[in-house]
Amino acid sequence: MNILSGLKKIFSAPHGKTEILPSYSAIKFRVVVIDFLDNIESNGGENLARLLSTKEGIAVGFFDDIFPKNFLNLESKTLFDLIDKGQSIIERTHADVIIWGYRENDRIRLNFQTAQQYEHPDGTYLSLLDSFYFPASCFENPSQFPPAILDVIYGAIISALIPANGAARIQKRYLLKKVIDKLSKDNSAKSVSVEYMPYIMNFLGIIYLSYAHDNKEEKDFKITKSLFETAIKHQDLLNSPLHLGCIYYHLGQLYDNATHQMETRPAAYFKGAIEYYHQAQRYLGKYTYPYDYGYISYKLSLLYFNYWKQKEDLQALRDSVFHLREAEKIYTYALFPNFWAVIQGELGQKLALLGNLTKSNEINELAITSYRNQQRVITERRDPINWALIQESIGEICYRLGRQNEDRSSLEDALECFHDALYIFENAGQEDKIKEIMTNLARTNQILNSL
Protein backbone atom coordinates (compact mmCIF):
# COMPACT_ATOMS: atom_id res chain seq x y z
CA MET A 1 0.00 0.00 0.00
CA ASN A 2 1.21 3.51 -0.82
CA ILE A 3 0.99 5.22 2.56
CA LEU A 4 1.80 8.64 1.12
CA SER A 5 -0.70 8.41 -1.74
CA GLY A 6 -2.85 11.51 -1.86
CA LEU A 7 -0.29 13.68 -0.09
CA LYS A 8 0.90 15.10 -3.38
CA LYS A 9 -2.54 16.58 -3.87
CA ILE A 10 -2.61 17.89 -0.29
CA PHE A 11 0.90 19.29 0.01
CA SER A 12 1.22 20.69 -3.47
CA ALA A 13 -2.11 22.55 -3.33
CA PRO A 14 -1.64 26.21 -4.32
CA HIS A 15 -0.72 28.46 -1.42
CA GLY A 16 -1.13 31.75 -3.24
CA LYS A 17 1.97 33.68 -4.20
CA THR A 18 5.13 31.62 -4.21
CA GLU A 19 7.22 32.42 -1.17
CA ILE A 20 10.92 32.94 -1.76
CA LEU A 21 12.81 32.24 1.42
CA PRO A 22 16.51 32.93 1.86
CA SER A 23 18.75 30.02 2.70
CA TYR A 24 20.90 30.71 5.74
CA SER A 25 23.63 28.31 4.71
CA ALA A 26 25.75 29.29 7.72
CA ILE A 27 23.14 27.86 10.09
CA LYS A 28 23.62 24.20 10.86
CA PHE A 29 21.38 22.60 13.45
CA ARG A 30 23.25 19.95 15.40
CA VAL A 31 21.64 16.51 15.53
CA VAL A 32 23.03 13.58 17.51
CA VAL A 33 21.85 10.00 17.01
CA ILE A 34 22.24 7.82 20.12
CA ASP A 35 23.35 4.23 19.53
CA PHE A 36 20.13 2.21 19.39
CA LEU A 37 19.03 -0.15 22.12
CA ASP A 38 18.83 -3.36 20.09
CA ASN A 39 18.74 -6.98 21.17
CA ILE A 40 20.72 -8.07 18.12
CA GLU A 41 24.07 -6.99 16.77
CA SER A 42 23.35 -4.02 14.50
CA ASN A 43 24.59 -0.65 13.36
CA GLY A 44 21.14 0.94 13.23
CA GLY A 45 22.02 4.20 14.96
CA GLU A 46 25.23 4.64 13.03
CA ASN A 47 23.47 3.90 9.73
CA LEU A 48 20.73 6.44 10.50
CA ALA A 49 23.36 9.07 11.33
CA ARG A 50 25.09 8.35 8.03
CA LEU A 51 21.84 8.61 6.08
CA LEU A 52 20.85 11.86 7.78
CA SER A 53 24.27 13.41 7.17
CA THR A 54 23.23 14.00 3.55
CA LYS A 55 20.38 16.30 4.58
CA GLU A 56 20.49 20.08 4.26
CA GLY A 57 20.92 22.36 7.24
CA ILE A 58 21.93 19.78 9.85
CA ALA A 59 25.26 18.57 11.18
CA VAL A 60 24.87 14.99 12.36
CA GLY A 61 26.87 13.17 15.01
CA PHE A 62 26.73 9.65 16.47
CA PHE A 63 26.90 9.00 20.21
CA ASP A 64 28.03 5.47 20.99
CA ASP A 65 28.96 5.65 24.67
CA ILE A 66 27.84 2.53 26.50
CA PHE A 67 25.29 3.08 29.29
CA PRO A 68 22.07 1.36 30.45
CA LYS A 69 19.10 2.28 28.26
CA ASN A 70 16.31 0.38 29.97
CA PHE A 71 14.43 3.71 30.41
CA LEU A 72 13.66 3.64 26.68
CA ASN A 73 10.66 1.41 27.34
CA LEU A 74 8.70 4.67 27.88
CA GLU A 75 7.25 3.42 31.16
CA SER A 76 6.25 6.22 33.50
CA LYS A 77 8.51 5.03 36.33
CA THR A 78 11.64 5.53 34.20
CA LEU A 79 10.52 8.58 32.21
CA PHE A 80 12.47 11.08 34.27
CA ASP A 81 15.62 8.95 33.85
CA LEU A 82 15.14 9.23 30.10
CA ILE A 83 14.67 13.00 30.23
CA ASP A 84 17.60 13.47 32.60
CA LYS A 85 20.01 11.32 30.57
CA GLY A 86 18.95 13.02 27.37
CA GLN A 87 19.54 16.46 28.85
CA SER A 88 23.03 15.45 29.97
CA ILE A 89 23.86 14.22 26.45
CA ILE A 90 22.45 17.42 24.94
CA GLU A 91 24.66 19.49 27.23
CA ARG A 92 27.69 17.34 26.54
CA THR A 93 27.30 17.29 22.74
CA HIS A 94 25.71 20.76 22.33
CA ALA A 95 22.99 19.08 20.27
CA ASP A 96 19.82 20.86 19.20
CA VAL A 97 18.06 17.51 18.80
CA ILE A 98 18.97 13.99 19.89
CA ILE A 99 17.39 10.82 18.52
CA TRP A 100 16.76 7.72 20.58
CA GLY A 101 16.30 4.34 18.87
CA TYR A 102 14.70 1.29 20.46
CA ARG A 103 13.89 -2.11 18.96
CA GLU A 104 10.44 -3.58 19.58
CA ASN A 105 10.35 -7.03 17.95
CA ASP A 106 10.87 -6.41 14.23
CA ARG A 107 10.41 -2.64 14.45
CA ILE A 108 12.56 0.31 15.38
CA ARG A 109 11.00 3.10 17.41
CA LEU A 110 12.48 6.61 17.25
CA ASN A 111 11.92 9.39 19.79
CA PHE A 112 13.19 12.95 19.57
CA GLN A 113 14.43 15.06 22.47
CA THR A 114 15.45 18.72 22.77
CA ALA A 115 16.59 20.94 25.59
CA GLN A 116 13.67 22.55 27.47
CA GLN A 117 11.26 20.31 25.57
CA TYR A 118 8.82 20.45 28.45
CA GLU A 119 9.34 23.97 29.69
CA HIS A 120 9.96 26.36 26.80
CA PRO A 121 6.97 28.73 26.47
CA ASP A 122 7.35 28.82 22.68
CA GLY A 123 8.65 25.32 22.26
CA THR A 124 8.16 22.56 19.74
CA TYR A 125 4.91 20.78 18.94
CA LEU A 126 6.78 17.49 19.24
CA SER A 127 6.67 15.52 22.48
CA LEU A 128 9.38 13.15 23.63
CA LEU A 129 6.62 10.53 23.71
CA ASP A 130 5.85 10.94 20.00
CA SER A 131 7.09 7.66 18.55
CA PHE A 132 8.00 6.97 14.94
CA TYR A 133 8.03 3.29 14.00
CA PHE A 134 9.45 1.69 10.89
CA PRO A 135 10.72 -1.81 9.96
CA ALA A 136 14.05 -2.79 11.47
CA SER A 137 14.77 -4.56 8.19
CA CYS A 138 15.31 -1.17 6.57
CA PHE A 139 18.78 -1.20 8.12
CA GLU A 140 19.72 -4.57 6.67
CA ASN A 141 20.53 -2.66 3.52
CA PRO A 142 20.75 1.08 4.27
CA SER A 143 21.26 1.90 0.60
CA GLN A 144 17.66 0.80 0.02
CA PHE A 145 16.22 2.81 2.94
CA PRO A 146 12.94 4.35 1.65
CA PRO A 147 13.72 8.02 0.93
CA ALA A 148 10.22 9.11 1.97
CA ILE A 149 10.65 7.52 5.40
CA LEU A 150 14.02 9.23 5.78
CA ASP A 151 12.41 12.54 4.84
CA VAL A 152 9.70 12.05 7.47
CA ILE A 153 12.46 11.47 10.06
CA TYR A 154 14.29 14.54 8.76
CA GLY A 155 11.07 16.56 8.91
CA ALA A 156 10.53 15.39 12.50
CA ILE A 157 14.02 16.63 13.41
CA ILE A 158 13.37 20.06 11.92
CA SER A 159 9.95 20.19 13.62
CA ALA A 160 11.56 19.39 16.97
CA LEU A 161 13.94 22.37 16.79
CA ILE A 162 13.46 25.31 19.13
CA PRO A 163 15.06 28.21 17.20
CA ALA A 164 17.36 30.43 19.20
CA ASN A 165 16.72 33.56 17.11
CA GLY A 166 14.87 34.99 14.13
CA ALA A 167 17.35 33.73 11.54
CA ALA A 168 17.11 30.19 12.89
CA ARG A 169 13.29 30.46 12.87
CA ILE A 170 13.35 31.46 9.19
CA GLN A 171 15.77 28.64 8.39
CA LYS A 172 13.55 26.12 10.17
CA ARG A 173 10.50 27.17 8.16
CA TYR A 174 12.52 27.13 4.93
CA LEU A 175 13.70 23.56 5.57
CA LEU A 176 10.18 22.42 6.50
CA LYS A 177 8.81 23.90 3.27
CA LYS A 178 11.39 21.98 1.27
CA VAL A 179 10.80 18.66 3.00
CA ILE A 180 7.02 19.00 2.57
CA ASP A 181 7.49 19.67 -1.12
CA LYS A 182 9.78 16.65 -1.43
CA LEU A 183 7.37 14.35 0.41
CA SER A 184 4.57 15.40 -1.94
CA LYS A 185 6.57 14.04 -4.89
CA ASP A 186 7.94 10.85 -3.33
CA ASN A 187 6.14 7.50 -3.47
CA SER A 188 8.95 5.40 -2.02
CA ALA A 189 6.97 4.65 1.16
CA LYS A 190 4.67 2.34 -0.80
CA SER A 191 6.79 -0.61 0.31
CA VAL A 192 6.03 0.08 3.98
CA SER A 193 3.23 -1.96 5.54
CA VAL A 194 -0.10 -0.33 6.47
CA GLU A 195 0.60 -1.04 10.16
CA TYR A 196 2.82 2.05 10.17
CA MET A 197 0.06 4.32 8.84
CA PRO A 198 -0.96 6.08 12.11
CA TYR A 199 2.64 6.81 13.09
CA ILE A 200 3.53 8.24 9.70
CA MET A 201 0.36 10.33 9.57
CA ASN A 202 0.97 11.66 13.07
CA PHE A 203 4.45 12.83 12.12
CA LEU A 204 3.26 14.29 8.81
CA GLY A 205 0.72 16.24 10.85
CA ILE A 206 3.45 17.48 13.20
CA ILE A 207 5.60 18.54 10.25
CA TYR A 208 2.78 20.44 8.58
CA LEU A 209 1.62 22.00 11.87
CA SER A 210 5.18 23.17 12.53
CA TYR A 211 5.38 24.71 9.08
CA ALA A 212 1.95 26.36 8.98
CA HIS A 213 1.60 27.31 12.66
CA ASP A 214 1.52 31.06 11.99
CA ASN A 215 -0.69 30.89 8.89
CA LYS A 216 -4.19 32.35 8.98
CA GLU A 217 -5.52 30.29 6.05
CA GLU A 218 -8.22 27.79 6.90
CA LYS A 219 -7.02 25.34 4.25
CA ASP A 220 -3.77 24.85 6.16
CA PHE A 221 -5.81 24.12 9.27
CA LYS A 222 -7.90 21.59 7.34
CA ILE A 223 -4.86 19.87 5.82
CA THR A 224 -3.20 19.41 9.22
CA LYS A 225 -6.47 18.29 10.81
CA SER A 226 -7.00 15.68 8.08
CA LEU A 227 -3.57 14.16 8.71
CA PHE A 228 -4.17 13.71 12.45
CA GLU A 229 -7.71 12.46 11.84
CA THR A 230 -6.36 9.87 9.39
CA ALA A 231 -4.00 8.69 12.12
CA ILE A 232 -6.92 8.38 14.56
CA LYS A 233 -8.98 6.43 12.02
CA HIS A 234 -6.22 3.81 12.11
CA GLN A 235 -5.89 3.79 15.89
CA ASP A 236 -6.51 0.03 15.92
CA LEU A 237 -2.98 -0.31 14.52
CA LEU A 238 -1.43 1.54 17.48
CA ASN A 239 0.28 -0.74 19.98
CA SER A 240 -0.27 1.56 22.98
CA PRO A 241 -2.91 4.11 24.12
CA LEU A 242 0.05 6.41 24.74
CA HIS A 243 0.39 7.01 21.00
CA LEU A 244 -3.30 7.85 20.65
CA GLY A 245 -2.91 10.39 23.45
CA CYS A 246 -0.11 12.09 21.51
CA ILE A 247 -2.33 12.44 18.42
CA TYR A 248 -5.15 14.01 20.45
CA TYR A 249 -2.53 16.29 22.01
CA HIS A 250 -1.53 17.56 18.56
CA LEU A 251 -5.14 18.13 17.57
CA GLY A 252 -5.44 20.23 20.72
CA GLN A 253 -2.33 22.17 19.68
CA LEU A 254 -3.78 22.71 16.21
CA TYR A 255 -7.06 24.14 17.55
CA ASP A 256 -5.20 26.08 20.26
CA ASN A 257 -3.04 27.69 17.61
CA ALA A 258 -6.14 28.51 15.56
CA THR A 259 -7.57 30.53 18.46
CA HIS A 260 -4.67 32.95 17.93
CA GLN A 261 -4.40 32.86 14.14
CA MET A 262 -7.86 32.34 12.66
CA GLU A 263 -10.18 35.33 12.40
CA THR A 264 -13.45 33.41 11.99
CA ARG A 265 -15.32 31.06 14.36
CA PRO A 266 -13.01 31.67 17.38
CA ALA A 267 -15.45 30.02 19.82
CA ALA A 268 -15.37 26.77 17.83
CA TYR A 269 -11.57 26.70 17.98
CA PHE A 270 -11.56 27.32 21.74
CA LYS A 271 -14.03 24.48 22.22
CA GLY A 272 -12.06 22.11 19.99
CA ALA A 273 -8.75 22.88 21.70
CA ILE A 274 -10.17 22.31 25.18
CA GLU A 275 -11.93 19.09 24.18
CA TYR A 276 -8.87 17.60 22.47
CA TYR A 277 -6.51 18.59 25.29
CA HIS A 278 -8.81 16.93 27.82
CA GLN A 279 -9.04 13.88 25.57
CA ALA A 280 -5.23 13.71 25.42
CA GLN A 281 -5.03 13.83 29.22
CA ARG A 282 -7.14 10.65 29.39
CA TYR A 283 -4.16 8.83 27.88
CA LEU A 284 -1.34 11.04 29.13
CA GLY A 285 -2.32 10.92 32.78
CA LYS A 286 -1.03 12.85 35.76
CA TYR A 287 0.47 9.72 37.33
CA THR A 288 1.62 7.95 34.16
CA TYR A 289 3.06 10.65 31.87
CA PRO A 290 3.12 13.67 34.19
CA TYR A 291 5.24 16.02 32.09
CA ASP A 292 2.93 15.90 29.08
CA TYR A 293 -0.10 16.05 31.36
CA GLY A 294 1.36 19.06 33.16
CA TYR A 295 2.25 20.92 29.99
CA ILE A 296 -1.24 20.31 28.59
CA SER A 297 -2.60 21.73 31.86
CA TYR A 298 -0.43 24.82 31.34
CA LYS A 299 -1.76 25.25 27.80
CA LEU A 300 -5.34 24.74 29.04
CA SER A 301 -4.78 27.50 31.56
CA LEU A 302 -3.75 29.92 28.82
CA LEU A 303 -6.75 28.89 26.73
CA TYR A 304 -9.23 29.46 29.55
CA PHE A 305 -7.61 32.81 30.34
CA ASN A 306 -7.90 34.00 26.74
CA TYR A 307 -11.50 32.79 26.69
CA TRP A 308 -12.16 34.80 29.87
CA LYS A 309 -10.69 37.92 28.24
CA GLN A 310 -13.14 37.54 25.36
CA LYS A 311 -16.26 36.47 27.24
CA GLU A 312 -15.62 37.78 30.80
CA ASP A 313 -16.75 34.38 32.07
CA LEU A 314 -15.57 34.21 35.69
CA GLN A 315 -15.63 30.41 35.67
CA ALA A 316 -13.13 30.43 32.79
CA LEU A 317 -10.76 32.47 34.98
CA ARG A 318 -11.24 29.99 37.83
CA ASP A 319 -10.56 27.11 35.42
CA SER A 320 -7.40 28.88 34.29
CA VAL A 321 -6.14 28.99 37.88
CA PHE A 322 -7.09 25.34 38.45
CA HIS A 323 -5.05 24.12 35.48
CA LEU A 324 -2.07 26.24 36.49
CA ARG A 325 -2.23 24.57 39.91
CA GLU A 326 -2.16 21.20 38.14
CA ALA A 327 0.95 22.22 36.18
CA GLU A 328 2.54 23.60 39.36
CA LYS A 329 2.31 20.18 41.03
CA ILE A 330 4.44 18.64 38.27
CA TYR A 331 6.86 21.39 37.25
CA THR A 332 8.42 21.91 40.65
CA TYR A 333 11.02 24.42 41.79
CA ALA A 334 13.50 21.60 42.46
CA LEU A 335 13.33 20.05 38.97
CA PHE A 336 12.19 22.83 36.62
CA PRO A 337 13.02 26.14 38.37
CA ASN A 338 12.68 28.40 35.33
CA PHE A 339 9.36 27.00 34.15
CA TRP A 340 8.14 26.89 37.75
CA ALA A 341 8.87 30.62 37.93
CA VAL A 342 6.84 31.21 34.75
CA ILE A 343 3.93 29.30 36.28
CA GLN A 344 4.20 31.30 39.53
CA GLY A 345 4.08 34.55 37.57
CA GLU A 346 1.02 33.37 35.64
CA LEU A 347 -0.63 32.34 38.92
CA GLY A 348 0.15 35.72 40.45
CA GLN A 349 -1.47 37.54 37.53
CA LYS A 350 -4.60 35.38 37.37
CA LEU A 351 -5.13 35.17 41.13
CA ALA A 352 -4.76 38.94 41.36
CA LEU A 353 -7.46 39.39 38.72
CA LEU A 354 -9.70 36.83 40.41
CA GLY A 355 -9.11 38.43 43.82
CA ASN A 356 -9.98 41.85 42.44
CA LEU A 357 -13.18 40.62 40.79
CA THR A 358 -14.36 38.66 43.83
CA LYS A 359 -13.04 41.15 46.44
CA SER A 360 -11.44 38.18 48.21
CA ASN A 361 -8.61 38.96 50.63
CA GLU A 362 -7.56 35.30 50.65
CA ILE A 363 -7.21 35.08 46.87
CA ASN A 364 -5.24 38.35 46.79
CA GLU A 365 -2.89 36.97 49.45
CA LEU A 366 -2.41 33.84 47.33
CA ALA A 367 -1.49 36.07 44.38
CA ILE A 368 1.17 37.80 46.49
CA THR A 369 2.56 34.41 47.56
CA SER A 370 2.83 33.31 43.91
CA TYR A 371 4.64 36.50 42.94
CA ARG A 372 7.02 36.07 45.91
CA ASN A 373 7.64 32.51 44.75
CA GLN A 374 8.54 33.80 41.31
CA GLN A 375 11.15 36.06 42.91
CA ARG A 376 12.97 33.00 44.22
CA VAL A 377 14.15 32.57 40.63
CA ILE A 378 13.88 36.12 39.27
CA THR A 379 16.06 37.84 41.84
CA GLU A 380 16.99 41.51 42.14
CA ARG A 381 20.61 40.71 41.42
CA ARG A 382 20.12 38.39 38.42
CA ASP A 383 17.23 40.15 36.67
CA PRO A 384 16.56 43.54 38.28
CA ILE A 385 14.02 44.88 35.76
CA ASN A 386 11.74 41.86 35.86
CA TRP A 387 12.17 41.66 39.64
CA ALA A 388 11.04 45.29 39.85
CA LEU A 389 8.02 44.59 37.65
CA ILE A 390 7.01 41.82 40.05
CA GLN A 391 7.48 44.20 43.01
CA GLU A 392 5.21 46.67 41.24
CA SER A 393 2.56 43.95 40.78
CA ILE A 394 2.78 43.00 44.47
CA GLY A 395 2.52 46.68 45.38
CA GLU A 396 -0.65 47.04 43.33
CA ILE A 397 -2.27 44.10 45.15
CA CYS A 398 -1.22 45.50 48.55
CA TYR A 399 -2.60 48.90 47.57
CA ARG A 400 -5.91 47.32 46.59
CA LEU A 401 -6.09 45.36 49.85
CA GLY A 402 -5.24 48.46 51.87
CA ARG A 403 -7.87 50.62 50.16
CA GLN A 404 -10.50 47.86 50.27
CA ASN A 405 -9.99 47.07 53.97
CA GLU A 406 -8.73 50.49 55.16
CA ASP A 407 -5.64 48.63 56.28
CA ARG A 408 -2.56 50.77 56.98
CA SER A 409 -0.25 47.74 57.06
CA SER A 410 -1.15 46.71 53.48
CA LEU A 411 -0.75 50.28 52.27
CA GLU A 412 2.68 50.52 53.90
CA ASP A 413 3.64 47.24 52.21
CA ALA A 414 2.53 48.77 48.92
CA LEU A 415 4.73 51.81 49.53
CA GLU A 416 7.73 49.58 50.22
CA CYS A 417 7.17 47.58 47.02
CA PHE A 418 6.73 50.72 44.92
CA HIS A 419 9.91 52.26 46.34
CA ASP A 420 11.85 49.06 45.59
CA ALA A 421 10.62 49.16 41.99
CA LEU A 422 11.28 52.89 41.67
CA TYR A 423 14.92 52.46 42.70
CA ILE A 424 15.49 49.89 39.92
CA PHE A 425 13.68 51.89 37.25
CA GLU A 426 15.55 55.08 38.18
CA ASN A 427 18.88 53.30 37.84
CA ALA A 428 17.77 51.92 34.47
CA GLY A 429 16.56 55.31 33.28
CA GLN A 430 13.07 54.00 32.41
CA GLU A 431 11.14 57.28 32.45
CA ASP A 432 7.71 55.80 31.65
CA LYS A 433 7.93 53.32 34.52
CA ILE A 434 9.22 56.04 36.87
CA LYS A 435 6.11 58.13 36.12
CA GLU A 436 3.83 55.12 36.75
CA ILE A 437 5.47 54.35 40.08
CA MET A 438 5.38 58.00 41.19
CA THR A 439 1.64 58.01 40.48
CA ASN A 440 1.20 54.82 42.51
CA LEU A 441 3.19 56.29 45.40
CA ALA A 442 1.13 59.47 45.37
CA ARG A 443 -2.24 57.72 45.50
CA THR A 444 -1.05 55.30 48.19
CA ASN A 445 0.18 58.14 50.39
CA GLN A 446 -3.07 60.01 49.82
CA ILE A 447 -5.14 57.12 51.17
CA LEU A 448 -2.72 56.56 54.06
CA ASN A 449 -3.00 60.21 55.09
CA SER A 450 -6.78 59.97 55.04
CA LEU A 451 -6.96 57.04 57.45
Image: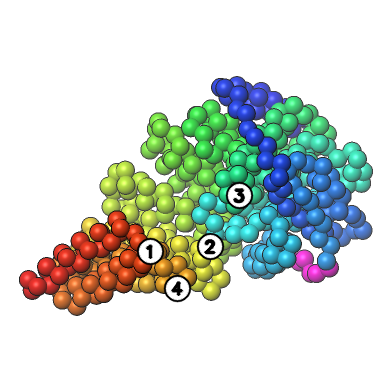
Q: Nearer the viewer, mark 4 or mark 1?
A: 1
The quadrant of the rendering that contains the C terminus is bottom left
Q: Nearer the viewer, mark 1 or mark 3?
A: 1
Q: How many marks?
A: 4
Residue 428 has which mark?
1
Point out the tag, 4 or 2, that comes first from the N-terminus: 2
* Element under disc 3: loop
For label 4, the residue is: 381
Q: Secondary structure at mark 2?
A: loop
Q: From the viewer's perspective, tell me whether residue 58 is left or right of residue 362.
A: right
Cα distance in 3D space between marks 4 and 1: 13 Å
1 or 2: tag closer to the N-terminus: 2
Kind of residue indicated by mark 4: Arg
Q: Which mark is residue 163?
A: 3
Which mark, residue 32? none
Give whichever of 238, 299 is nearer the camera.
299
Q: Which residues are magenta?
A: 66-70
Q: Amino acid at mark 3?
A: Pro
* Alpha carbon distance from label 1 to label 3: 29 Å
Q: Residue at x 87, y 60 (%)?
A: 39
